[in-house]
Amino acid sequence: MKGKRLGLRKYLGLKLFRGIREQVVERHSLRTLFWECTLRCNLQCRHCGSDCRTDAQLSDMPLEDFLHVLDTEVTPNTDPSRVLIIFSGGEVLMRPDLERAGKEVSRRGYKWGMVTNGMALTQQRFEALLNAGLSSISVSFDGFETIHNDIRQNPLSYERALSALRMISRSGIAYDAITCVTPELVARLEEWKELLINQGIKNWRIFSIFPAGRAKRDDKLHLSPEQFRKVMEFIAATRKEGRINLSYACEGFLGGYETLVRDHFYMCAAGVNVASIRVNGDISGCTSVRANYTQGNIYRDKFWDVWQNRFEKFRNREWAKKDECKDCKVWQFCEGGGMHLRDDEGRLMYCHYKMLK
């Protein structure tokens, strides 16, 4: 049981990584660019952080507008082969021009991936996406049929997600199944792991649900500290076992579990190596970060100027050293958690380290 305790070896490793992180922040090399290409969705998930709808009030961003940013701002200032573009939503498969978007991005030398719920991923569509240069894909898969369908609010969602993962796992591209762990699933994680392995799924990533969007109004989705710690113990044991490639998401500092539940020490890369262009043109870190932390907009600002000269709150986190973080003994390693965990006033909504009590 590791909990909050940091052994000497881990403490020294974290101190060393802190110096490395300072250099990474200073360089802030763009490595991942999310394009929130739509807010339309074919599901109404209970835990949706974006609160998406089938007929989103905001129209999809025209592909030409995104390509203009690539051509005039990103490509002249980066090596496209070192920048991964991720199409996100909403549900990206709601866009009929997704294949064209993929081809245009690939033609410019970028690798691209996508995040999907799998509902609309047929064999024909998948092959078309592969032909358009798709190099990686993540599929949401949140538990056994009753659990997944209840969260996703659709009786077909489990079978569609499973079918998508079976199809993808045979293709040879990079992929993972993403599971948002709820209290109902915690006690059955061993069974869930066996199901994934038996289905030939080799890559698995676990998230915990944070209080934003619809999830903020649904207490039944949130883990207790005891359940959260059980999840950490399960991930650490599964990684040691080595039968499936499992990791915890890059959500927060995890004390003694650092490097046991993922391959690296914690760091929030939003605004450091990760940027996003939202459906309305807003420029931010990752797409989970709240609108209050928007740094500009492609329709009135130069993307590269924003990337180089703004993002102060993302790169210097001293402003977040307040409230429960003010006197925290692990501040130097955590720096207040992920930017997506801050509310509109900058208050911390969820502390992973505190959950390990």
Image (cartoon, grey):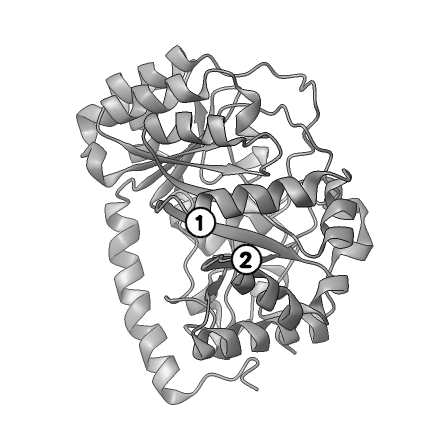
Q: Position of residue 148 (x, y in %)?
A: 71, 49
Location of mark 2 (residue): 199
Marking on residue 169: 1
Q: Nearer the viewer, residue 165 or 342?
A: 165
**Is disc 1 placed on a helix, strand or loop?**
helix
Q: Tag 2: residue type? A: Gln
- On screen, residue 74 versus residue 162, left or right, reads left
Say which label, 1 or 2, has the lower sequence index: 1
Please tell me which residue is depicted at 65% across the width and 76% down the height of the picture.
230
Residue nearest the observer in this picture, 147 or 108: 147
Residue type at numbered disc 1: Ser
The quadrant where residue 276 appears: top left
Percent of width and height locating residue 296: 44, 25
Quadrant containing the N terminus is: bottom right
One can see residue 174 in this view: yes
Q: In which quarter of the image is the C terminus?
A: bottom right
Q: Which residue is drawn at 59% across and 39% down?
A: 117
